[in-house]
Amino acid sequence: MSRCAYCKKQGADKKTAIRLWGKDRLKTKELDYCSDVCKQNIHYFAEFHNKYAPRFTVFVLVWLFLFLAIPFTLKAMTGNPIYVTVGSPAMMVLMGAVLIRFPIGLSTTKWAERLGIKYTNLYFRLTGVLLLFAGINLIWETLVK
Ligand SMILES: [Zn+2]
């Protein structure tokens, strides 16, 4: 019995072929699915993954840059520590929002294979929500004190 690649339900008896980016090239994979909705979601996932996965390292670097360089540069330029104490959490909020909108877990398919695409997305969205609230909380505490 195979499980649906999207929702992990048992008894997925149909197969669909997708091209998925792995390491440095596209590979064809056959995935099981249970319903047309799941099939559509699997293809959407592949499309999204292939669009972003090859550039994932760049995204991480850009994030690190935004996260560290901008607040610290502004602090160094102005001498005002508020840019670090508020700037970094603000980036956290932004990152959370991005995770909710585009679950970056899509950059690795290992999670998706183990948990199913649906739960992987859910997991990264929850992480995004946590980041968002943690960031807001940090900003709040800084500004209130
Ligand atoms: Zn399914």
Image (tube, helix red, strand yellow):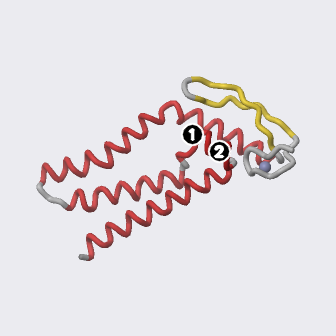
Which residue in the structure is indicated by mark 1?
A: 108
Amino acid carrying label 1: it is Thr
Q: Label 1: state its secondary structure.
A: loop
Is disc 1 surrounded by few (<14), some (14 to 19) or many (20+) residues within 10 Å?
A: some
Provide residue 136's location: percent of width, then percent of height: 38, 66
The numbered dot on residue 112 is 2
- In the rendered image, the residue lying farthest to the top is 25
Left or right, 103 with respect to 42, comes to left
Quadrant of the snapshot with the N terminus: top right
Left or right, 24 with respect to 57, comes to right
In the image, residue 137 above or below residue 72: below
Provide residue 59's location: percent of width, then percent of height: 43, 39
At x 68%, y 29%, the residue is 19
In the image, 77 versus 117, the foreground residue is 117
User: Could you tell me how far apart the alpha carbons at marks 1 and 2 are, in whole angstroms?
Assistant: 8 Å
At x 32%, y 46%, the residue is 66
Q: Label 2: state its secondary structure.
A: helix
Provide residue 15's location: percent of width, then percent of height: 83, 36
Provide residue 4's location: percent of width, then percent of height: 78, 46
Amino acid carrying label 2: it is Ala
At x 30%, y 56%, the residue is 88
Is disc 2 surrounded by few (<14), some (14 to 19) or many (20+) residues within 10 Å?
A: some
Q: Are marks 1 and 2 in contact (CB under 8 Å)?
A: yes
Quadrant of the snapshot with the C terminus: bottom left
In the image, 12 versus 39, the foreground residue is 12
In the image, residue 16 above or below residue 103: above
Left or right, 4 with respect to 62, comes to right
At x 48%, y 51%, the residue is 98
Residue 83: name its quadrant: bottom left
